[in-house]
Amino acid sequence: MAAPTTLAPVQQDEPVRGAPAGGRRWYQGGAAHIVLLGLLVVALYPIAYMIGTSFKSPQEILNNIDIWPREFSPGNYAEGWAGIPGITFGTFFLNSAVVSAGVVIGNVAACSLAAFAFARLRFPLRGLWFALMIGTLLLPHHVLIVPQYVLFNSLGWINTPLPLIVPKFLATDAFFVFLMVQFMRGIPRTLDEAAEIDGCGPYGRFFHVVLPLTKPALVTTAVFSFIQTWNDFFSQLVYLNDLDQYTVPIGLRLFLDSSGQNAIAPMFAMSVLSLVPVFLFFLFFQRLIVDGINTSGIKG
Amino acid sequence: MARFVRRTARTPVVVALAAVASVVLAACGGGASGQQDAGGAPVTDRPVQLSVAWWGGPARAELTQKTLDAYTKKHPNVTFTTQWQGYSGYYDKINTSAAGRNAPDIIQIDNRVLREYANKKIIADLGPWMGGTLKVDKIDPKLLGTGKVDDKLFALPLASNTQAFVVDKAVVEPLGLLPPETGWATWDEFAAWAGKVSAATGGKVWGTRDESASISAFEYWVRQQGKELYDGPKLGFGAAEVKAWFDMWAAMRDSGAASPQEVAQPANAGDISKNTVLTKQTVTTFSYDNQYTELVKGTDHALVLVPLPGAAEGAYARPSQFFTAYSRGANLGTAVDVINFFVNDPEAGALLGTERGLPPNADVRAAIQPNFSDQLKYVVAYDERVTGAAGDTPPVPAQGDSQINQLLISSAENAGFGRQSSQAAAEEFVSQANSALARASG
Amino acid sequence: MAVVTEAPVRAPRRGGRQADRAKEAVAGYVFLSPWLLGLFGVTLLPMLYSLYLSFTDYDLLQDPEWVGVENYVRMFTDDPKFWSSVGATLLFAVVSVPLKLAVALGVALLLYRNRRGVGMYRSLYYVPSLLGGSVAIAIVWQTLFSGQGAVNEVLGFFGIQGWSWITNPSTALGTLVLLAAWQFGAPMVIFLAGLKQIPAEMFEAASLDGAGRVQQFVHVTLPLLSPVLFFNLVLETIAGFQGFTAAFVISGGTGGPADSTLLYTLYLYMRGFGDFQMGYASAMAWVFLVALGVVTALVFRSGSLWVHYADEGDR
């Protein structure tokens, strides 16, 4: 199986192992479903608990540890949505969406460029740069907060989403560069060599050969970036000041002040609600991650 | 890939780095702050925008915002941007912005960082405005003193509170074990009472939470021994006191009077939602009295406030939070005027109510008292009863106070879970606390 | 992927080859330029500044003051909490990383075939990982592993008397490990992508040779999956050692009970922001970078022994 002959997608609905679709398969499938469902119950129990809790009254939350409320209190959702004076949770959702979208676009665009260089091109100092990139993953980021704050403050970017978004367009998230490098290295080199013989330069190879084949990694980057940004609390807290700039993770913590008031019930309600966009995002794109890959599956 | 490294031409990289580094260093290392307009009058005749930061929940945000709006109504040129969040992470953000020379103009703080911020010139000395822009004559001098560092006023108390044990009345009253309003004469009496409660509930509910990790309860107790938490920049007590404190609680745990540390631990970090009276695991726990109105919302049981056991001198009127002015703020005079408005203006007092605690200004307090709910009246009565008999107000905690709190928690947990003897835990606590304090005031 | 052997031999003229190289080098830097800008502008500079801070006494509020290697000396000779945090972090990483990867690979193997509803399964299995370090999940975890929590109810069904796992210093770290392993979605998705990349013919060939399921897994799946496994191993190792979020939210930022969940990065954060010792925290960060760098280098080194790349024929 040296060189691929075609880029046609592998058929999806065909049993992968080519075994005859007989009784044995059905039986195996049933067992697998039972295992999958059993594991799922365990994995989702805490989530169910969270949903159950979001319907408990404030008093019940503190002393009823059963999964379902004794007294159904859907009012937590209304209270949570409008619970912060002068603003609704909708603003936080919108802000989070803006920041997340910026991060997603930035990461996908910038990290794929860098990854292509590392995975496919030869140039002086490549080893050094690659090592530095991995190195940036290793330093605990808390010690960078203050110097970065100083930097962005001198640019006048505090209290705007810019410090959260712009660096992503400069591929500062080494995790995703590395992810794409690994992925691109899984694409047979023979493909772009064929393109090269056809007269494609590095730019053509990137746009016409490698990028289309990297789609699953791009989608993975998009999904992970989105989820990560949607949940990231600390950097958003540090850079955003005004209530109307706040994002969902900051918004959720506004309900909690350990020294005084606590509104755990509405916080749970909004936590459940904040899961919905990320879940839908994942549900929509997960197919592209794992299925899309088959266009490159003919290598080997 | 090693072969690429070999070809490295390092010099240009290093030069570039050095150039950029010098920019950041310059940005970080600004000169000392100049308090040019110390004592300057508030600017209200041209547009001024001030940023205000505090921690708290939604209710506090609403009341604070209304009060700021009321100021703007009086002085239309002065507008505000606000930053608020829960206590967790609050100082991280303030410290980061202070490191970036970009802190808010008005900062709410508590006394954990007061000395630190004052000595490091993050907050302005309010002395030059006293008597002028800033009126302090209606504030109890004892309470006002809590905002002074080395006799200079750096912080204005927004509210005060005092120490209490909150007791689940609904459990103890039917048992005939409701403690009197004046509490228990001694800690031994308290231990015996708690033991009776545990026994009477059949071990379902403990008489008291194990409070050995609570620095506030420990402070109360150590004051009853004639000591203070701090003696200047040093600890005001020794390992012997800590060991006696740990042993007292160990005895209560052993007798069943106090909950095991396992039950007490979640609330050690001070999170009100882990309060063991609200979770109905114990009948008694430590609380500051101003939290009472919040606590009763979390349970269907009736709660009462009782002074901590033993001599009343352990208690003191404690500032729950202060407003301070950022020393590098562009409009210090105006910031001070806003702080003054919060503390002394009757309209502001009416808006703020008692959400942060009891108002420090006696006139304001008297003016809004008639509107208090029964719960609030109960809290005020308790507070006045206890602080009336209270001891001297301790000096502002030493620099490094926040570490002492954390160190006591770990040592109490080590002792409480039997990972260390009370002697070893006490000695480790004192030695680590001493070196932390020495370093902090370094 | 040993099947890909030599790259087709191209034999252009000598001069042309050199020109190609130069062109490729230029292209390399063009592609790398945003990243380089980010490295120098946003990342490297603050990193180097933190390196400088590690040799200073820096309390965030006043200018840093040079103290030489004092922070480093203190860390190794005069800070018992430093060593207990090192111990907790090692234990956490060594247990949670393999556990999480095993769970992720196991579920991915169950999920990668196209059975009915597989998209839904994938998404549902991913839900725990959507939460990150939210406050809500911290409260849920504290409740589940408390004295009367669901975990003890299940154990009680089997006649096992449990205790409050999360507040007991000997088991609290274990609940963090479970939290980390529970959020296995990211490596699972990456494994799934990798599994899908394995051509069906490879299994057919192995089946024809009479290989059983286990043999197929060992001789076909694992080698072909090795780049993905490698990737997950590297990143989960780094994430495991950095394990901040879980410890922070579960312990309420204290590392309790009795410092048993005081992971290295949490301790570093507490020093830097809570105790106003950013110089010391920076020194801790650089010690961490060096130590984790050694671990990562070892993982990379080991990779040449067991990772097979599709493009390696060209190297």
Image: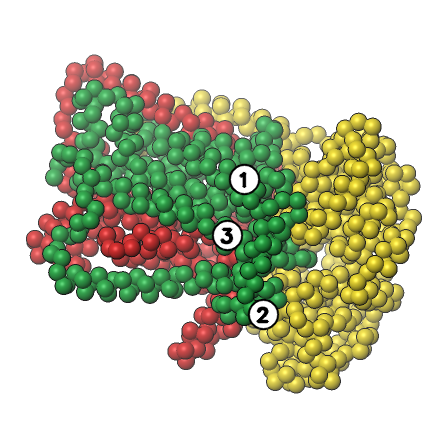
Which chain letter matches label 1?
Answer: A
- Give the colour in which the image draws chain B: yellow
Dot 1 falls on a residue whose secondary structure is helix
Dot 3 falls on a residue whose secondary structure is helix
Crowd around label 3: few <14 · some 14–19 · many ≥20 (10 Å): some
Residue topped by disc 2: A63
Residue topped by disc 1: A95
Q: Earlier in the sequence, mark 3 or mark 1?
A: 1
Which chain is the one coloured green? A
Looking at the image, which residue is at 86% across and 48% down? B346
- Eyeballing the image, is B247 above or below C50? below
Q: Earlier in the sequence, mark 1 or mark 2?
A: 2
- Eyeballing the image, is C266 above or below B332? below
Dot 2 falls on a residue whose secondary structure is helix
> Residue A49: where, in percent of width, then height?
48, 63
| Contact check, label 3 and label 1, Cβ < 8 Å | no
Which chain is the one coloured red? C
Amino acid, disc 1: Asn
Please indicate, yes or no, whether residue C233 appears anywhere in the rendered image.
no
Looking at the image, which residue is at 24% across and 65% down? A31
Q: Nearer the viewer, residue C116 or B104?
A: C116
Which chain letter matches label 3?
Answer: A
Residue topped by disc 3: A273
Please indicate, yes or no, whether residue B215 appears anywhere in the rendered image.
yes
Measured in 3D between alpha carbons, the distance from the residue under mark 1 to the one under mark 2, in whole angstroms, is 35 Å
